[in-house]
Amino acid sequence: GGADVAYQYQGKAAVKSAYQGVLLSAAYVPAYYKASEDYKQIEGWRHRLEFGSRYKMEDLTFKGIYRYDFNDREDLKSGNQFASYSPTEHSFELGVDWAVKKELSVGAALKYEDTQYEHVNVLRDIDGRTKQQQRESSTLSYDLSANYKLDAHWALNLTHKNYDQEDN
């Protein structure tokens, strides 16, 4: 194996409540990343807030979640160059699961994530010129899944994930 990049220490405080058939949830998930010497730019905190809901209607379960992530990392500083590793992320996810039979369920989910980095990057391009640009990205993804319960302890799961990510 290779060298360790970082260790992640994470906690979670969550609450759930049912209201008129809808399960509502909220969570705070702090995480600290302790990086090895070669990856100090990713060392620091990530704070996540999550708000979700789930609603069951006969054999269908609808779910939605919003996540807000704030990162406070060391970033990459080398001479007059700078690269941000401290993004703020907003993501939205909607999904549905269908219990086709007692032992078989299928599902689909759609997720959008918008990422904005805290500082302007200052980097030298391959042509030697210094460039400055605010990093940002957006990701649209979907999941398709099928789950088959073999017995009380074993199940088969098949998942297809597709990501479409745009970065500058």
Image (cartoon, rainbow, N blue to C red):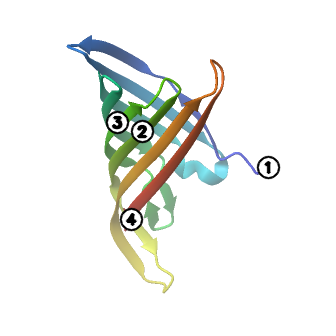
Horizontal side of 98 relative to 8 (left or right) equals: left
The residue carrying mark 1 is: 1
Q: Position of residue 59 (x, y in %)?
A: 35, 26
Give, as a three-letter code, the residue at label 4. Answer: Asp
Category of crowding for the residue at label 3, using alpha-carbon neighbours closer than 10 angstroms: few (below 14), some (14–19), many (at least 20):
some
Q: Amino acid at mark 2?
A: Gly
Q: Earlier in the sequence, mark 4 or mark 3?
A: 3
Give the CA distance from mark 1 to mark 2: 36 Å
Helix, strand or loop at disc 2? Answer: strand
Alpha carbon separation for disc pair 4 and 3: 29 Å
> Which residue is located at x 34 percent, y 36 percent?
96
Position in image of residue 125 (x %, y %)? 47, 79
Provide the secondary structure element on which disc 1 rests: loop
Q: Which residue is mark 4?
A: 167
Residues at circles 4 and 3 in contact by the CB criterion of under 8 Å = no
Please say if the residues under marks 4 and 1 sit with CB atoms less than 8 Å apart: no
Quick check: marks 3 and 2 in contact, CB under 8 Å? yes
Label 4, residues with CA under 10 Å away: few <14, some 14-19, many ≥20: few
Circle 2 residue: 107
**Residue extending farthest bottom:** 127
Would residue 156 be found to the left or right of residue 11 on screen? Answer: right
Q: Are marks 1 and 3 in contact (CB under 8 Å)?
A: no
Q: Name the foreground residue: 68 vs 147.
A: 147
